Image (cartoon, grey):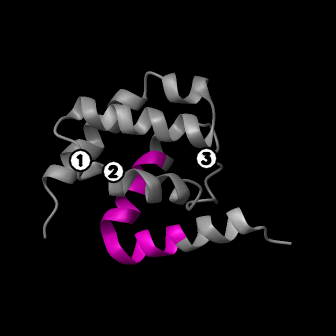
Amino acid sequence: MINRNQKETAASRAKAKKEYGKLFDAVSGILFQHDPAGVNFDFNKDEYDIEAGTILPRLKNCRSEEDVLIVIREELQKWFDDETAAREQNKEIAKELWDLWRNREF
């Protein structure tokens, strides 16, 4: 049985996918590649879709790679735990997401 939070999360993810399109897939892919939570089992490519859906809307307020790192850490802490949020590889994720965000086409 699906609870209310699961429905809201699914709706939020669908909205983000529609709004951001290929950018959504790219963000989810970067997270999956770096796998800060250790959930990449090679067959579950959408594992980081929820996090991509909550990170993307916050990128518009970022002015630097450091801002992106803060967003990543906050979202990973929310969805996983403090240890995941503090991982060193999140700096590389922030760099890649910042580069992606700055070079996106409108």
Q: Please name the residue shown 29% across and 45% down the image.
A: 97
The residue at the point 51 percent across, 29 percent down is 85
For image coordinates 40% across by 50% down, the residue present is 55
Quarter of the rendering occupied by the C terminus: bottom left
| Residue type marked 2 | Arg
Q: Which residue is mark 2?
A: 58
Choose top left, top right, bottom left or bottom right for residue 53.
bottom left
Image position, residue 35 (x, y; %) = 53, 40
Which of the two labelled residues, at mark 1 and mark 3, occupies the earlier sequence position? 3
Residue 62 as seen in the image, left or right of residue 86? left
Which residue position is annotated with label 3? 40
* Quadrant of the image occupied by residue 98: top left
> Where does label 1 land, which residue?
61
Proximity of marks 2 and 1: CB atoms separated by less than 8 Å: yes
Our reading of the magenta stretch's main secondary structure is helix
- Residue stretch rendered in magenta on the structure: 12-31
Which element type, helix, strand or loop, lies under badge 1?
A: loop
Residue at 56%, 74% (x, y): give it.
Answer: 11
